[in-house]
Amino acid sequence: MKALAYERYGPPEVLAVRPLPTPRPGAGEVLVRVRAAGLNPKDVLVRKGKFKWLGAAPFPRICAYDFAGEVAELGSAVRGLRVGQAVYGMLNRWAAGAAAEWVTVPEGELAPMPLIPSDAEPRDPYVLAAAVPLAALTALQALRDLLRVAPGQRVLINGASGGVGTFAVQIARIYGARVVTTSSAGNQALCRELGAAEALDYASTDPAQAGPFEGIFDVFGSLPFPRARVALTPAGRYVTAIPTPRNVVRDLMTRALAQSARLVVVRSRRRDLEVLTRWLVQGALRPVVDRVFALDDGAAAHAYIETKRARGKVVLRIDDAP
């Protein structure tokens, strides 16, 4: 099979489309024929070797955690899915593996793929679905489980125009929050379109002075807890998506405090994918896709993510859908 892989840590140039063996599903796994794979900043960090302390997976390593495609083969213990069914999901394993023609997925890490309404390009159902899992699951688990967003709360999404941020704005609105966002001036209109009641330009406004907030979700990593806490209510909560050692320590040390600083560590779960599916089908949630790249242009896709200028998600098209 063809796969976007790398033999060593390094810049985007280490990536190449390589012929690799087609995997076979274990008893509790599903073999998916991948049609599109979503890319995230996590892919860039892993490719650079930022998380090699978590364990060394063998090279070559295949990129991407998000996928959308069809069931090609079912493991002997898998129930409730059928060959040919469209599915989507996110791989929990650090070694990734979705930017390939085929990928094996534990059955609990995928769900039936929704047909997402779209009046704008791209309208490809696989591209739209592949843009969802990691970013939307991160936003859902941060807002629902850690910030515990409730109706009427004032919530700040810092860095609202990227993949996680665009979903976080919408999900906070679904939960009834009054959403305040920070982004560049050029993305303020997008933030308002997604549901922000107030859209701040980070270049001219200090978000730490825009409180008080019951919750702050620092997606971009530019608003650390010591600066953010002055904008929180006395029992306000703060969540970051940036997995630095310092943020891990803060998570452990502040859990029992009135003002907590938590680190969201996303997990792919079918029940959460099904929550997202319901909102996507209803039109309450939509993916924002910035650019779609061919698999052969995977290095260029990584380089674009590294500019930190993507509005929403970057997606790889693996091949043409049947």
Image: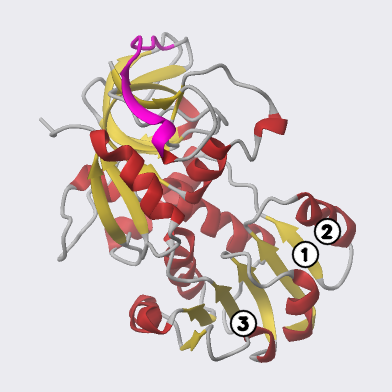
Residue wearing tag 1: 261
Q: Nearer the viewer, residue 225 or 126?
A: 225
SS category of the residue bearing label 2: helix
The N terminus appears in which quarter of the rendering? top left
> Can you name the residue that lies furthest to the left here?
322
Q: In this rendering, would 179 be left or right of 195?
A: right
Residue wearing tag 2: 250
Q: How is colour applied across the structure in the image?
A: secondary structure
- Provide the residue span drawn in magenta: 13-25
Q: CA distance from mark 1 to mark 3?
A: 18 Å
Mark identifier at residue 153:
3
Q: Residue at the location (37% across, 75% down)?
A: 194
Q: Residue at the location (59% across, 20% down)?
A: 57
Residue 209 visible: yes
Q: In this rendering, would 219 be left or right of 40?
A: right
Q: CA distance from mark 3 to mark 2?
A: 24 Å
* Viewer-nearest of discs 1 and 3: 1
The C terminus appears in which quarter of the rendering? top left
SS category of the residue bearing label 3: loop
